[in-house]
């Protein structure tokens, strides 16, 4: 009994050994409670309980919630409900000997997830009434009916456009390859941490990769279609840029996972840095690289279809044109052709990747 | 001059503050088989890697054939490394490449960068590689993938690769630690052959005292980064053993 209380006390009283951890824990708690306050007030109270359809927004509300969260966090910090304390200050013994799923702080997390779910349903405007409305069902019946009766008269056009899409994806992947291959080395931490200068290059490369990758190819396609005109070329450029950054990221991660042994051995023979990379690094990465590249081509074919929707050429553009004219029978055929390509690409790329493992 | 390597007051502190080597001084004579013993973490590997400058020593001096090597950079450093062969516990062969290619990587320092990228090696080097593959008893396996060989065979490929450099010193970092006992003896015999027949100086890290007594001509022992013993292998008696492996011995008695 005494032992139990002692143990509890040890778990309850925060460990003040490290001030930064203490601050981190408090910040986490503040953010969690501010979020709980804000979500409860804005969504559960305003929208659901008093049903205010056009609630006004002002910055004072989140700021008030932040303040409230801070006060709550300060109080809760001294109870077992504190999540931050558990994350940053808990001692290892407790973590290993108790089931974290059943500890008090876990219920705060469950409640937060539940609150987010409730808010999410409201924000996404989930409505069963609209889903099963008579007009809605009729519309669905009409469109599905047309889609299921595809117009095979345009099949040769569709296949031609599909070929354009596949070629576009292939060229985008091929052009991206040498760039990604080179950039991959500069984005690999283990190769670039030898000096401050190299580490600077690593950080700049990483920043470039992250920014270009975080902008969707769809957006790049719009930018490039203004630049070089609407058509497959713009789509290809968009895919190419996105492929460079994605592949370079994957390649660099592969380089970071290689074994140091052969590199050390090549250095020990007196090899030059380029020879060390060619014999110590490259043989370890060729197959994963090939596998990533084929997978990327597969992804690019799918993306090329989407990019076509904003005028990037190929079957996507065709789809957009027929959809704009509400010619659902033609759209149905295009959907079948797209599904066939995606299926074939997916199947063959997985087969090839399995074969070279 | 008989000394090939002179190490004076060598010190290595890792960026995380670990002092791996602390004031280590010793000499290595031409043609000897010097064994380095000590517990795991006593600084043996660090010592070998300081000699060929895979690691940079923090302080102290290393003289190879009378010239200081601790400050070398770039091309002079690479030609130093070319004169010092090295084999590793985990063999460190280039994966997916043949035995022949692996042995030929020992010539990288004298092969041009462009030529080596296209895998073009000189006829003499290829002939020499063939001879060395025969020497380590792997005749007929030239075109096999090195990573498909057994552990002992891989280590012999690594020996051939190191010999391809025509080294003056061969560093062996626990060459038999991941091999079974019979294979260990075979690999150690090849190292002995290299030392006795080719006259290459061998500096070898070892764990098993039985191997030390059988193959070493001289022993140095490290403990917590300090040199605690230097002498012939026959001098390691019970008391020295306790000094070098002290903590282990205490643990055994308690259990």
Image (cartoon, coloured by chain):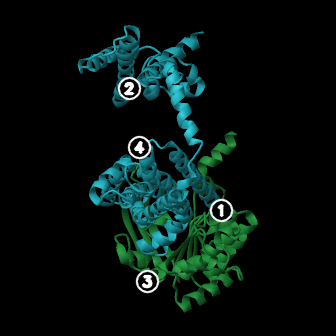
Chain colours: A cyan, B green
Mark with earlier residue (1, 2): 2
Numbered disc in front, either 1 or 4 = 4
> Whole-percent x and y of residue A83?
45, 22
Q: Residue at x 55, y 91 (%)?
A: B123
Q: Are marks 2 and 3 on the same chain?
A: no
Disc 2 target residue: A28
Total number of numbered discs in the rendering: 4
Chain where mark 4 sits: A
* Residue B69 image-quadrant placement: bottom left
Determine which of the numbered discs, if any, sits on residue A355 in the image.
1
Query: Is residue B13 visible in this depiction of the protein?
Result: no
The N terminus of chain A - image quarter? top right
Chain where mark 3 sits: B
- The residues bearing labels 3 and 4 have C-alpha atoms spaced at a distance of 62 Å
Disc 4 target residue: A324
Determine which of the numbered discs, if any, sits on residue A257 in the image.
none
Q: Are marks 2 and 4 on the same chain?
A: yes
Disc 3 target residue: B112
Q: Are marks 3 and 4 on the same chain?
A: no
- Local packing at callout 1 (Cα closer than 10 Å; few below 14, some 14-19, many 20+) is few
Marks 1/2 in contact by CB < 8 Å: the verdict is no
């Amino acid at each position: 009994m005494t032992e139990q209380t002692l143990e509890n006390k040890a778990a309850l009283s925060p460990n003040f050994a490290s001030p930064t951890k203490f601050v981190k824990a408090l910040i986490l708690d503040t953010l969690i409670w501010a979020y709980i306050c804000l979500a409860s007030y804005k969504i559960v109270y305003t929208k659901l309980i008093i049903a205010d359809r056009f609630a006004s927004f002002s910055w004072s509300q989140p700021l008030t919630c932040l303040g409230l969260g801070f006060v709550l966090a300060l109080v809760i910090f001294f109870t077992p409900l504190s999540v931050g304390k558990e994350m940053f200050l808990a001692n290892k013994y407790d973590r290993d000997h108790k089931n974290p799923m059943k500890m008090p702080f876990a219920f705060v997390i469950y409640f937060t997830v539940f609150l987010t779910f409730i808010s999410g349903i409201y924000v996404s405007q989930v409505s069963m009434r609209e889903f099963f409305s008579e007009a809605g069902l009729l519309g669905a019946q009409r469109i599905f009916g047309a889609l299921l009766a595809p117009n095979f008269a345009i099949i040769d056009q569709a296949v031609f456009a599909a070929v354009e899409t596949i070629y576009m994806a292939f060229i985008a992947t091929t052009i991206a390859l040498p760039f990604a291959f080179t950039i991959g080395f500069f984005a690999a931490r283990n190769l670039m941490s030898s000096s401050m200068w190299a580490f600077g290059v690593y950080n700049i490369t990483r920043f470039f990769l992250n920014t270009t990758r975080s902008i969707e190819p769809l957006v790049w396609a719009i930018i490039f279609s203004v630049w070089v005109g609407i058509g497959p070329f713009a789509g290809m450029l968009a895919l190419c840029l996105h492929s460079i950054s994605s592949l370079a990221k994957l390649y660099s991660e592969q380089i970071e996972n290689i074994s140091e042994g052969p590199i050390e051995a090549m250095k020990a023979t007196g090899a030059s840095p380029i020879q060390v990379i060619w014999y110590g690094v490259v043989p370890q990465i060729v197959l994963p690289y090939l596998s990533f590249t084929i997978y990327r081509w597969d992804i690019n074919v799918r993306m090329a279809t989407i990019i076509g929707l904003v005028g990037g050429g190929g079957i996507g553009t065709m789809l957009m044109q027929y959809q704009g004219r509400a010619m659902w029978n033609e759209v149905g055929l295009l959907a079948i052709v797209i599904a066939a390509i995606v299926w074939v690409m997916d199947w063959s790329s997985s087969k090839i990747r399995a074969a070279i493992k | 001059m008989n000394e090939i390597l002179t190490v004076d007051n060598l010190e290595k502190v890792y960026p995380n503050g670990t002092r791996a080597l602390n004031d280590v001084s010793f000499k290595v004579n031409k043609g000897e088989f010097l064994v380095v013993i000590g517990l795991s973490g006593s600084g043996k590997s660090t010592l070998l890697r300081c000699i060929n400058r895979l690691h940079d020593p923090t302080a102290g001096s290393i003289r190879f054939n009378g010239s200081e090597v601790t400050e070398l950079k770039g091309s002079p450093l690479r030609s130093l490394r070319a004169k010092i062969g090295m084999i590793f516990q985990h063999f460190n062969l280039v994966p997916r490449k043949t035995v022949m290619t692996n042995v030929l990587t020992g010539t990288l320092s004298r092969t041009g960068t462009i030529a080596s990228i296209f895998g073009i090696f000189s006829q003499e080097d290829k002939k020499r590689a063939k001879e060395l593959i025969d020497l380590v008893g792997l005749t007929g396996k030239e075109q096999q993938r090195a990573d498909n060989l057994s552990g002992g065979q891989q280590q012999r490929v690594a020996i051939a690769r190191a010999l391809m450099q025509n080294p003056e010193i061969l560093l062996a970092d626990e060459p038999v630690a991941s091999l079974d006992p019979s294979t260990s003896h075979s690999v150690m015999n090849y190292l002995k052959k290299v030392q006795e027949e080719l006259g290459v100086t061998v500096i070898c890290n070892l764990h098993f005292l039985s191997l030390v007594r059988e193959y070493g001509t001289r022993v140095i022992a490290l403990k917590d980064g300090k040199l605690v013993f230097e002498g012939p292998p026959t001098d390691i008696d019970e008391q020295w053993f306790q000094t070098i492996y002290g903590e282990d011995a205490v643990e055994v008695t308690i259990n």
